[in-house]
Image: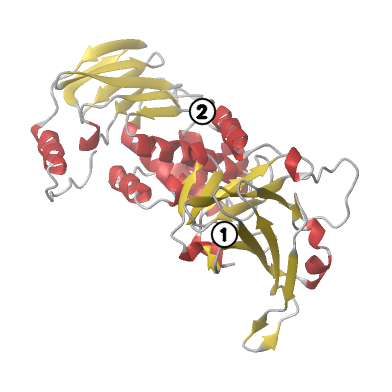
Amino acid sequence: MNTAARGGIAVGVLDTPSLALVDTAGRVALPDADIEIDWRVYTDRWRGASAASPRQVAIDAMPAVETRVAVGGGDVVHRVYATAGSPAAVVIDIENASPGPVAIAVSLHGLSAAAQQHLDTVLIPSRPWQEHNTKDGTKDGTKDGTKDGVVELVWPLPHRASVRMLVPLVPFVATPSGVSLDPAARPSADEVARGWSIQLGRGARLELDDVTLQRAIDGARAALLLHAGVDRPRPGVDVAMALEDWGFDAEAAVVWQRLSLRERRRAARRVPMSDPWAVVRAAVQGAPGGVPSDAGAFLRAIHDVVVREIGGAHTRSRPTTSTIELFPGFPAEWLGTSVSLHDMPTRLGPVSAALRWHGPRPAILWSAPEGITLRAPMLDASWTVTGASGEALLAAPSEQLLRLATARREGERVAEPGSFY
C-alpha cells in the first residue's frame, strides 16, 4: 500500500485496533483493509489533488486532517477524521467552497471482487453517486484476481454543496441491528478535534510560546494514544517509552505487554538521547499537517529536552531519593520565552516546573514530591534545591547560549553543541 508505506497523519478511534493514514494530498490508506482512497476535482479538466498544490493542516493539531485545493477563486475542502459508533468509521467529507460548480471523483484502489460486489459496505455516501466506473487492475499485463480492482465514484457539487462518506474501520458484509450508516449523523471534523483535545487533558503537558512546536507536541500526544491500541502498525519501543514519559500509564501497560523480550530489554535500559533538540527540530521540519510522523520518538526527544531523572538511593520497594534535572536540553530558541511543564512522571511522583523571565534572568517555579533534588545545570549550574515547591531567580544564561541565540537571530551558521547534557 503506497500511502501506508509513505506514512502520513493517522486518524482513528481510541480502543479500536484499526486506523487510517492520510498523506499530504489527502489520499487515505486503510492498512488493515489494504485499500487506498484517492480523489480528484473537475472544473475544466480533471486534476488530482497531488498535482494541484494542496494545502494541508491537522485541525487543532488533532487526528482530523483538512486538505484544500484551489479552484476558480475558492477551494475544494477535503476533510478526513474518524468517529466512534456502530460501526467505528473514517469520515471523508468533501465540500465545494468555490464560487462555481465542480465534480468530485473518489477512487478506491485494491478492492477484491467480493468488496466490489458489496461496495455499499466499504463506502457509504450521504448522496447517491452519478457515475460508477469499475476496472480490473493488472500487474505486468496479467490479471490479478485478489486485490487490485479500482472503483471510481463521481458526484457533481454545486457551490457550497458537499458529500460525506463513511468507510468502516472494520469491514462488514451484512448490516446488523443497531448499526448506523447515516453519514449525516456523525459529528463534524471540528467536533472530533474538540473531543481529542479533551482527551489530552490527562497525562503530562508542556506549554510553550512557540505555536508551531506546541501544535506538534499536542498532535503527537494524540497520535501516541491512537497508535497505542492498533494492530497495524504494531506499537513499538518508542511508543511504550513515550507513553510512560507522558503519564499515559494505562496505555503504556497495554503496549508493554505486546513488546517482544528484546524490545522490553531495550525499553528498560532507556538511554537518554545525545542531542534531543536536534531530533525535535528535524521532526518538526516538514511534518505533514504540522504533526511529526514518528510520535513516539518525537515525544521522547521533547521529554529529554525538559526533564532528566538521575536515580538515587532505593528501599526494597521504591526509590527514596532522586535528582531531577529541569530543562537539561534547553535550546537557545527558548531564551526569553515562557515554558511550563505539568505533571511529568518520575519514580517518586509527578514534577511540574515553569520558566518566566525577569530581564535576562530566568525565574523558575517548581512543584515536586518530597525527597527529590532539583537542578537546572543548563540554565544555572550553581542552583540546586530539595523541597516540595518554591520559586527562585536564576543567574543570567551562559555566554555560549547567548552567542548561539544571537547567531540564530542573525541567520549565521553556527556549530551546535554535541549535546545539551
Which residue lies under the disc numbered 2?
203
Residue in front for this viewpoint, 112 or 205: 112
Q: Quadrant of the N terminus?
A: bottom right
Residue 216 in the image: x percent, y percent?
Answer: 42, 41
* Mark 1 crowdedness (10 Å alpha carbons): few <14, some 14-19, many ≥20: many
Residue 251 picture quarter: top right
Q: Is residue 121 left or right of residue 79?
A: right
Residue 17 in the image: x percent, y percent?
Answer: 68, 48
Q: Please, what secondary structure does the residue beneath circle 2 have?
A: loop
Any mark on residue 310, and which? none
Which residue lies under the disc numbered 1?
27
Q: Is residue 248 left or right of residue 186?
A: left
Tell me how far mark 1 sits from mark 2, CA to CA.
32 Å
Q: Are dots 1 and 2 in contact, CB under 8 Å?
A: no
* Mark 2 crowdedness (10 Å alpha carbons): few <14, some 14-19, many ≥20: some
At label 2, the amino acid type is Gly
Residue 258 in the image: x percent, y percent?
Answer: 62, 48
Q: Is residue 76 above or below residue 110?
A: above
Residue 26 picture quarter: bottom right
Task: Give the farthest residue toward the bottom.
Answer: 141
What residue do we see at 13% from left, 23% from top?
A: 396
Q: Is residue 348 left or right of residue 333?
A: right
**Residue 313 in view here:** no
